Image (tube, rainbow, N blue to C red):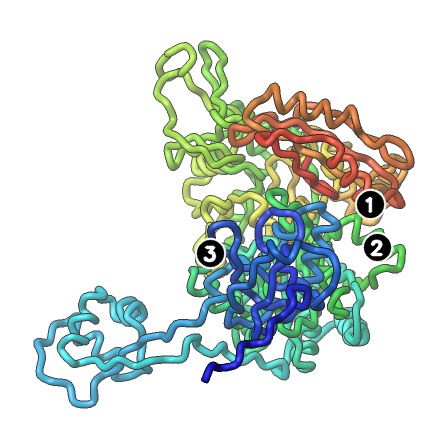
């Protein structure tokens, strides 16, 4: 007897889905759904893409028989659904919103939310080792005895942990296993995260802190943006810790964004004291295994609090209920490569999507956030005084025209005397100069040739302690030549201008007994480096810190009472729209490192322009007056936050083709109706990583539909394949 034939299914009745792939392509692609496979938006799926398989996310389901899409005879089927938790709706809505706002392909935004492909694969069992119940006889060596002692007093451990804690090589562990001394134990795929305790008591709050906490608790029922605005040392962290505790009590997850995760050593210690355990961390220094495990813990809701850099915004939170953006003014929150976005602004968007609060904290809030408070879009919570009664430091200007340093020196006699006095008093000092390396420029005294990066329009910076010349834009590095490459003269290269290494050399010359430490992004590469730096300063093993902007924020050193800024004029050059605001923020933050405890603080700013409004405002402590003047200037010119900006960066290896493309774009620019296009012109950094760069700047009123105009404009012109046109909505850098 023949078995009955299966009923035929009409092609038009096939279920279909739209799958978004983490690639810089157009929209989601249509795929068929095999019979018996149930799919829903957010599911991770494997799909055929040309001759290979790719992993994407189901973005939408299409009812059988619905019109449109790919013709049914060309439709490929989904290969399968991955055994992973789906991408939450909040993440998917953020991807769509960001793609529309930044004009980036949705798949390019999705790629940031799928940054750990291994986390989508089934977790592998973890193998550990314990002492065997009845070990056979074996030859005991000192290394083997250390392993036995370790495992006698603790739980089973993996090979790597045993080797590290017992100070032995992996071969020692393998030998004990082969001898039958160790038994293999299978552990759960991921170790359980320590529990956070929101009920642990925090410090006694001041009346201003308590009022801010009450306002944050009141706003916890839905979306609310709050600007936590307090002077340096006012205790903003303790205030938002209470908001975190409230979110944990409600069973919600929390994200804290920091601009420099390497700066978080003291923050993490304070968090552990307050909540009894450390939060999950997310930054570039994590190992691949830890990134995978953290991604999964966030997706399962096991990671209750995550502290991280801007990329932590795209983790798959199961039940996110609060976002805190600390140092919200910091330019490090702006990403310029790839998808150009500002993490502070996208954090507020994510909170609005999820209908939960966002807290922006800063001692020097951005003008954008201040204007949002004045417009009623954010609550303004003010902490006017330092916590515990500490006084703000006294800020003085040193006029270098009257008190110049000696020739080939950079520290004025006034600042030298203050450093010597502070050292004699047993107190700590900070010398601040926002220039890494030894000198920003090296030239030949014979022919005047300047050593330039071979890939960028930038001078090579000498790092004398490492014996290297380095480009701080593309990362190129090479040895310092013995002779000029242009004229061949030996020993003719001279350093021009100071960097922190040159300050260290000068300090050692007039205070040889001072113990100093240089602190830059070259020396603090990971959180463990930052923790070691903090410990040495707290233990008073350092007399003078010589650092760049990495020391300007977040640190609390009770015995640091003097801050000397070597070049207070540095950030004002270049004509950047936000130059004055950034200079004020940076210098105010670095000044705030002084006198944070019982000892009074003093700040000395060296300048050739003491009448500059920024420096006068700093010396007078008139932040509000400075912001009012800055806002008036920007509003009069229609500049952000009172107007809109977008940058188009045209780049490629063929400079002539880049210029022609930029001019062709300008010829079709969307003028009128509140939109004005400036340029094209060569970018100030004309060559970057071997690519020639031209820029156009679009200036628009707040009400102008700038994204629609840009989208239409870009579609009008066929861009050569070898030329890239990047759009940066709300640019922060004009290089």
SS class, disc 1: loop
Residue 388, can we see it? no
Residue 259 vs residue 394: left or right? left
SS class, disc 2: helix
Label 1 or label 3, whichever comes before in sequence order: 3
Q: CA distance from mark 2 to mark 3?
A: 34 Å
Q: Where residue 537 appears, x then y in whole percent? A: 48, 56
For label 3, the crowd category at 10 Å Cα-Cα, with few meaning under 14, some 14 to 19 and many 20 or more, is some
Check disc 2 and report the residue beneath it: 372
Q: CA distance from mark 1 to mark 3?
A: 34 Å
Residue 228, can we see it? yes
**In the picture, which quadrant includes the N terminus?**
bottom left
In the image, what residue occupies the spot 60% across and 72% down? 8
Q: CA distance from mark 2 to mark 1?
A: 9 Å
In the image, what residue occupies the spot 60% across and 54% down? 74
Compared to residue 345, the image places residue 307 above or below, namely: below
Residue 596 vs residue 357: left or right? left
Check disc 1 and report the residue beneath it: 641
In the image, what residue occupies the spot 42% across and 64% down? 289
Residues at marks 1 and 3 touching, judged by CB atoms closer than 8 Å = no
Q: Where residue 387 appears, x then y in whole percent? A: 70, 66
Q: Where residue 267 appears, x then y in whole percent? A: 57, 64
Label 2 or label 1, whichever comes before in sequence order: 2
For label 2, the crowd category at 10 Å Cα-Cα, with few meaning under 14, some 14 to 19 and many 20 or more, is some
Q: Nearer the viewer, residue 733 or 2?
A: 2
In the image, what residue occupies the spot 65% across and 74% down? 319
Compared to residue 448, the image places residue 35 above or below, namely: below
Considering every residue shown, the one lying at the far front of the view is 1
Check disc 3 and report the residue beneath it: 285
Residues at marks 2 and 1 touching, judged by CB atoms closer than 8 Å = yes
């Amino acid at each position: 007897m023949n078995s009955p034939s299966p009923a035929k299914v009409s092609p038009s009745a096939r279920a279909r889905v739209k799958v978004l792939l983490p690639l810089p392509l157009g929209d989601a692609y249509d795929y068929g759904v095999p019979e018996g496979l149930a799919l829903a938006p957010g599911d991770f799926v494997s799909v055929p893409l040309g001759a290979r398989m790719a992993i994407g996310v189901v973005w939408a389901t299409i009812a059988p028989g619905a019109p449109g899409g790919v013709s049914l005879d060309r439709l490929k089927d989904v290969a399968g659904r991955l055994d992973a938790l789906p991408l939450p709706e909040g993440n998917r809505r953020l991807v769509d919103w960001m793609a529309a706002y930044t004009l980036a392909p949705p798949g390019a935004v999705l790629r940031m939310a799928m940054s750990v492909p291994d986390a989508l694969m089934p977790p592998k069992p973890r193998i550990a080792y314990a002492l065997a119940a009845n070990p056979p006889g074996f030859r005991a060596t000192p290394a083997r005895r250390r392993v036995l002692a370790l495992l006698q007093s603790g739980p089973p451990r993996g090979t790597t942990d045993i080797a590290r804690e017992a100070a032995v090589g992996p071969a020692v562990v393998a030998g004990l296993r082969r001898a039958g001394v160790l038994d293999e134990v299978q552990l759960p795929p991921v170790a359980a995260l320590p529990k956070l305790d929101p009920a642990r008591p925090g410090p006694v709050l001041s009346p201003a802190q308590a009022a801010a906490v009450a306002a944050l608790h009141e706003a916890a029922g839905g979306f609310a943006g709050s600007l936590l605005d307090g002077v340096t040392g006012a205790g903003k962290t303790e205030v938002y810790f209470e908001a975190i505790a409230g979110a944990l009590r409600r069973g919600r997850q929390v994200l804290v964004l920091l601009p420099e995760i390497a700066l978080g050593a003291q923050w993490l210690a304070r968090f552990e004291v307050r909540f009894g355990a450390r939060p999950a961390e997310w930054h570039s220094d994590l190992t691949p295994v830890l990134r995978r495990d953290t991604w999964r813990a966030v997706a399962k809701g096991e990671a209750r609090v995550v502290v991280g850099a801007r990329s932590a915004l795209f983790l798959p939170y199961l039940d996110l209920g609060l976002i805190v953006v600390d140092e919200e003014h910091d330019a490090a929150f702006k990403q310029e490569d790839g998808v150009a976005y500002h993490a502070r602004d996208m954090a507020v968007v994510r909170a609005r999507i999820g209908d939960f609060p966002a807290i922006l904290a800063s001692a020097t809030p951005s003008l954008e956030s201040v204007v949002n408070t004045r417009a009623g879009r954010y609550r303004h919570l003010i902490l006017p005084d330092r916590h515990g009664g500490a006084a703000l430091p006294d800020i003085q200007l040193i006029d270098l025209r009257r008190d110049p340093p000696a020739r080939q020196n950079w520290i004025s006699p006034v600042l030298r005397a203050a450093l010597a006095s502070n050292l004699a008093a047993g107190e700590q000092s900070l010398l601040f100069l926002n220039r890494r390396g030894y000198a920003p420029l090296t030239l030949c005294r014979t022919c005047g040739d300047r050593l330039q990066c071979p890939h960028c329009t930038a001078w090579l910076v000498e790092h004398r302690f490492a014996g290297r010349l380095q480009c701080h834009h593309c990362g190129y590095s090479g040895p310092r030549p013995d002779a000029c490459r242009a004229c061949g003269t030996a020993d003719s290269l001279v350093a021009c201008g100071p960097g922190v290494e040159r300050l260290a050399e000068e300090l050692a010359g007039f205070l040889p007994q001072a113990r100093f430490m240089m602190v830059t992004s070259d020396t603090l590469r990971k959180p463990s480096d930052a923790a070691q730096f903090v410990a040495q300063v707290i233990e008073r093993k350092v007399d003078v810190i010589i650092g760049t902007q990495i020391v300007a924020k977040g640190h609390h050193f009770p015995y640091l009472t003097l801050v000397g800024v070597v070049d207070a004029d540095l950030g004002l050059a270049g004509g950047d729209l936000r130059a004055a605001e950034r200079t004020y923020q940076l210098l105010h933050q670095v000044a705030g490192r002084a006198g944070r405890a019982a000892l009074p603080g003093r700040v000395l700013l060296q300048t050739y322009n003491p009448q500059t409004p920024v420096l006068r405002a700093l010396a007078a402590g008139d932040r509000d007056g400075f912001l009012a003047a800055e806002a008036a200037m920007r509003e009069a010119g229609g500049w952000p936050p009172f107007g809109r900006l977008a940058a188009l960066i045209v780049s490629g290896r063929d400079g002539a083709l880049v210029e022609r493309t930029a001019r062709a774009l300008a010829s079709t620019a969307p003028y009128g109706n509140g939109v004005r296009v400036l340029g094209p012109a060569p970018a100030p950094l004309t060559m970057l990583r071997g690519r020639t760069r031209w820029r156009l700047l679009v200036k628009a009123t707040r009400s102008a539909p700038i994204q629609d105009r840009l989208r239409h404009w870009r579609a009008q012109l066929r861009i050569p394949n070898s030329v890239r046109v990047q759009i940066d909505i709300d640019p922060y850098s004009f290089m």
